[in-house]
Image (tube, helix red, strand yellow):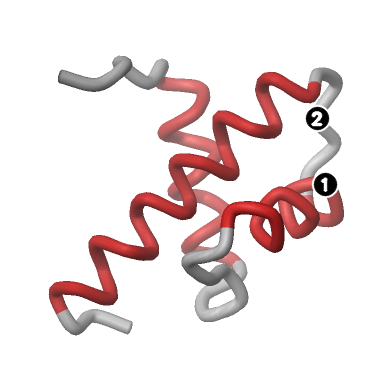
Amino acid sequence: MGRIKTQLIKRTTEQLLAKYTGQFSEDFVANKELVNKFVSVHSSKLRNMVAGYLTRLSRVRKAKGLQ
């Protein structure tokens, strides 16, 4: 069982994936820098949660062959 993501995290992540398709990778640190670049996030915890969810979705999509 993992941690439950809030709607804010999910919505922000889906918007980033829709707008910047193909720029995110399976690397958390690289995704963290891209989130900083694309979104004005006020806290590092929120930025890390979005970057972590982006990383997870990128891995799942690659495993399914969607990217």
Q: Is residue 12 left or right of residue 64?
A: right
Q: Is residue 33 left or right of residue 28?
A: right
Tag 2 near tag 1, CB within 8 Å: yes
Image position, residue 67 (x, y; %): 33, 83
Which sits earlier in the primary sequence, circle 2 or circle 1? 1
Q: Name the residue that disc number 2 marks.
A: 41
Secondary structure, mark 2, is loop
* Other residues around mark 1 within 10 Å, as few (<14) / some (14–19) / many (≥20): some
Q: Residue at x 82, y 46 (%)?
A: 36
Rendered view: 42 above or below 61: above
Q: Residue at x 49, y 61 (%)?
A: 17
Compare residues 57 and 29 and report the one nearer the observer: 29
Q: Is residue 62 left or right of residue 10?
A: left
Q: Residue at x 33, y 64 (%)?
A: 59
Count of residue discs: 2
Image position, residue 30 (x, y; %): 70, 62
Q: Name the residue that disc number 1 marks.
A: 36
Secondary structure, mark 1, is helix
Compare residues 31 and 20 and report the one nearer the observer: 31
Q: Given the image, on which type of amino acid does mark 1 rest?
A: Asn
User: Which of the 4 image quarters holds residue 61?
Assistant: bottom left
Q: Is residue 22 left or right of residue 38?
A: left
Mark 2–mark 1 distance (CA, rounded to whole Å): 7 Å
* Other residues around mark 2 within 10 Å, as few (<14) / some (14–19) / many (≥20): some
Q: Given the image, on which type of amino acid does mark 2 rest?
A: Val
Image position, residue 54 (x, y; %): 48, 51
Rendered view: 67 above or below 39: below
Q: Residue at x 71, y 49 (%)?
A: 32
